[in-house]
Amino acid sequence: MHPDQPLKVVAIGGGTGLAALLRALKIEAGRPRDPWKLTGIVTVSDNGGSSGRLRTELGGIPPGDLRNCLTALIREDSSLSDLMNYRFQGSGSLAGHALGNLMLLALAEITGSWVKALRDLSGSLVTLGRLFPSTLVPVTLVAEDMAGQRYDGETAVNDSKPPLARLWLEPQAPDPLPESMLAVLQADLILLAPGSLYTSTIPNLLIDELRDAIVRSEAPVVYIANLMTEPGETAGLTLEDHLAAIQAFGGLGVRAVIANEAPLPASVLDRYRQEGGAPILISASKICGVPVYSRDLVDPSMDTVRHHPERLIRAIRDCLETL
């Protein structure tokens, strides 16, 4: 930490979890004095929905998680956010595609570079912070459960039976994006975002060089825990199970965990339980030897269970004071 320099924060993850964390972090990145320097590193193993279709038809990396996180970094909420996330209706070839996905792919083809495409679109949208894919190699996430059942692709892994015995990328050892490596090596703080444990949080850590860069950076690594388990992928897993999976598959130490301690309304719990989800509870002040910072992180204004941006950033600040 350098008191005379901006705090350089790298957030790693994918999907809605990383987007939620970036919404919280942009509070600090957007303040007029001593703003944090924010970088998001996004997993690119998605093979479902609009991203999966575009990946199959056009090749290259899937744009969906990048688009979702880019939208989260827009300085002020506006119709541009709605435009980026707009999905075409109907039953034609465009049905289900998000406009922002098509825009990112088009810019990547025009500029010949995903880095330039993200930078140019970020400039047009007026975002706070930078965004990079973890790799430009089209990777497939593969898993094996305790019974030896194999799951190929992120969508299949999401429906797997936890806990998993093995998790890896194909092709193995893909080259990381140099800009992502540099951001990690220069970081003062590295945050592992909430989100799907095996398909969003861990896949970036399966890139050997990127994981080694996290270790070499000597920046403290903090895991922002999920609020709920997911049907399939993490059904029945505890907070300890989440952290143990990150340490085992990710191969790195975690300095602290930030987790929710607030109870959820019974009506909300009933709805999630009917779908196979359950709250992730804190069982101790330390798990797997790692301190847990328990705070009220739930957004009470949402019908679904989501992190409240201001509550989450306060918890991150509190954690920072002790690292």
Image (cartoon, grey):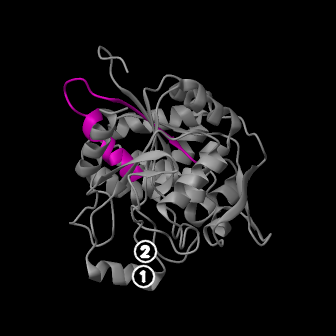
Query: Which quarter of the picture shows residue 120?
Result: top left
Magenta residues, as a range?
A: 19-43
In-image side of 114 versus 277 (left or right): right
Query: Could you tell me the amino acid type at mark 1?
Result: Arg
| Residue situated in front as seen by the camera: 124 or 1 | 1
Say which element carries label 2.
Answer: loop
30 drawn magenta: yes
Q: Residue at x 52, y 50 (%)?
A: 288
In-image side of 229 versus 306 (left or right): right
Where does residue 44 sit, x and y in percent of width and height?
A: 60, 49
Where does residue 135 sit, x and y in percent of width and height?
A: 64, 39
Q: Is residue 77 visible?
A: no
Q: Is residue 105 visible?
A: yes
Residue denoted by label 2 = 278
Check if mark 1's residue and mark 2's residue have beta carbons within 8 Å. yes
The disc label shown at residue 273, or none: 1
Q: Residue at x 33, y 68 (%)?
A: 305
Where does residue 194 sit, x and y in percent of width and height?
A: 45, 54
Q: Earlier in the sequence, mark 1 or mark 2?
A: 1
- The residue most toward the top is 4
Say which element carries label 1.
Answer: helix
